[in-house]
Amino acid sequence: MQRMMTRLLALMLLSIGSTATVQAQTWNLANDFSDTNGGTSPWSYGYYTSGLSPASFQAFSTYALRDEGRLATWYRGSPVDPNIQKNVTTSAYSQPGTGITFNPGEVTFGPLGGPTVARWTAIEGGVFNISAMFKWVQTKNAAPNAYVYGNTQQWFSQTVTETGVSWSSAGPVTLAANESIDFVVWGGGHENKTTQVQATITAVPEPGAFVLVVTGLLGLGAAARRRQRV
């Protein structure tokens, strides 16, 4: 009996450990950056075709490894703006004539002709913590604005600065499957400095697994006490 209970507890812990690993998953815009299909699920890269309207999101259709292989770039077509780029090298790159410095591993948004958007879509429903940072990396032009949208609701709006503006959800956010979070940079006229964007979404582990552990331990303890009284 004791051996059976020990095995049962071990199986419970193994199962719960595997579940907790999945539930605690984190998605990061820079780390997850992809050169396939306008982004690899759950990320997609694109722009709004009608002002600040998430419903008008259109994924970029063109990809190229530009500037002598330094910049992995998603963009709409000709011209290259709007775009989302990542410096895939290990060195900073100062692009001639633009006043832009691309640091290694960073993702930047070119907002001219945007709004430029990185969209994260929930593969399945859950509870998530969300954070973002926007910082311009170009000396020319005026600063654009940064936005965060949860589906059609605007959660954040602020002018981008050289030192960066940050946002995080006030607490865990509940999302259903296929609901999305948009990280947006946009400016009209000369308000189009290229902007570094950091974005992170972390799934919050559900408490059900821990409740199951405690319940199982209590049950095993009660069974052991009954055996001692017999």
Image (cartoon, rainbow, N blue to C red):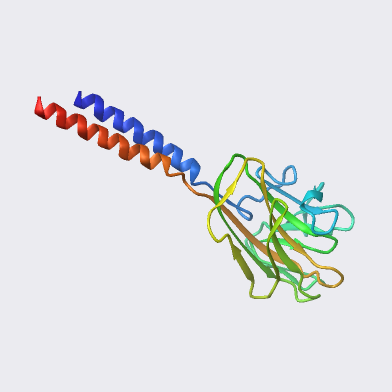
> As drawn, which residue projects farthest toward the right?
78
Residue depicted at 70% across the width and 71% down the height: 160
**In the picture provided, is 163 more to the left or to the right than 126?**
right
Q: Decide if residue 29 is in sight here.
A: yes
Give the number of callouts: 0
Task: Using the rendered view, name the quadrant where residue 14 is placed.
Answer: top left
Towards the viewer: 81 or 65: 81
Q: Is residue 17 left or right of residue 131?
A: left
Residue 198: % across, % down: 63, 61
Out of 192 and 34, give the one closest to the viewer.
Answer: 192
Residue in the foreground of this view, choosing between 205 and 61: 205
- In the figure, 164 relative to 132: above or below? below
Q: Where is residue 146 in the image (x, y as percent from the top left)?
A: 71, 65
Which residue is more in the foreground, 128 or 104? 128
Q: Which quarter of the rendering shows the C terminus?
A: top left
Residue 69 in sight in this render? no
Q: Could you tell me which residue is drawn at 15 percent across and 28 percent down?
A: 226
Q: In this view, does 177 lie above or below 83?
A: above
Image spot of residue 209 (x, y percent): 40, 39
In the depicted structure, whether residue 116 falls above or below residue 206: below
Q: In the picture, which quadrant includes the N terminus? A: top left
> Can you tell which quarter of the image residue 18 is in?
top left
Residue drawn at (47%, 46%) of the image: 205
Residue plotted at (64% across, 62% down): 104
Image coordinates of residue 159 in percent, x first then y, are 72, 72
